[in-house]
Image: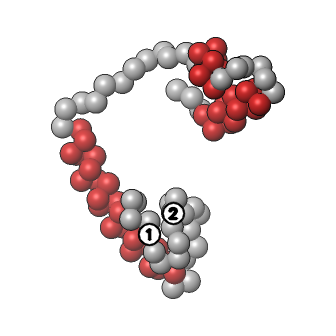
Amino acid sequence: MMKEATAFGCAMRVALGARFFNSFAESVECWVRVEKEFQLQEGAHSEYSKHYERWRKVYAEFMKIVDQGLLTPMWRAYGHLGSCVWPLL
């Protein structure tokens, strides 16, 4: 499990820019090790989709309250623009 994937990816790009590697693929080959692979469990996607749809509805309602100035969120989902939520969320 990569705990700092963003920082690690940035370090890989910096190493590429500093010409420690000839390509990003080469940096991945050198620095990344797969310890475990996970396989999708049959039926899990539909179960997760139900929860995701429920979360989307809750989030949309929450953001209406935020837009009224009644609450301040600790974070905003990617693509949130005022009272408009990106269609992909």
Q: Is residue 22 shown to the viewer in this render?
A: yes
Q: Relative to 19, is 73 above or below?
A: below
Q: Residue furthest right?
A: 18
Q: Residue 53: horizontal and vertical position, in percent? A: 29, 59
Residue 9 left/right relative to 44: right
List the residue tagged with mark 2: 79
Is tag 2's residue or tag 1's residue first in the polypeptide sequence? 2
- Percent of width and height locating residue 12: 69, 28
The residue depicted at 70 percent of the width and 20 percent of the height is 22
In the image, residue 63 above or below residue 75:
below
Q: Residue at x 28, y 53 (%)?
A: 51
Callout 1: SS: loop
The amino acid type found where label 1 is placed reads Val
Residue topped by disc 1: 85
Residue depicted at 78% across the width and 23% down the height: 19
Verify CB contact (< 8 Å) between mark 2 and mark 1: yes
- The kind of secondary structure element at disc 2 is loop
Q: Residue at x 52, y 26 (%)?
A: 1
Q: How is the image coloured?
A: secondary structure
Spatial distance from mark 2 to mark 1, Cα to Cα?
7 Å
Q: Quadrant of residue 61?
A: bottom left
| Mark 2: amino acid | Gly
x, y percentage for residue 63?
46, 73
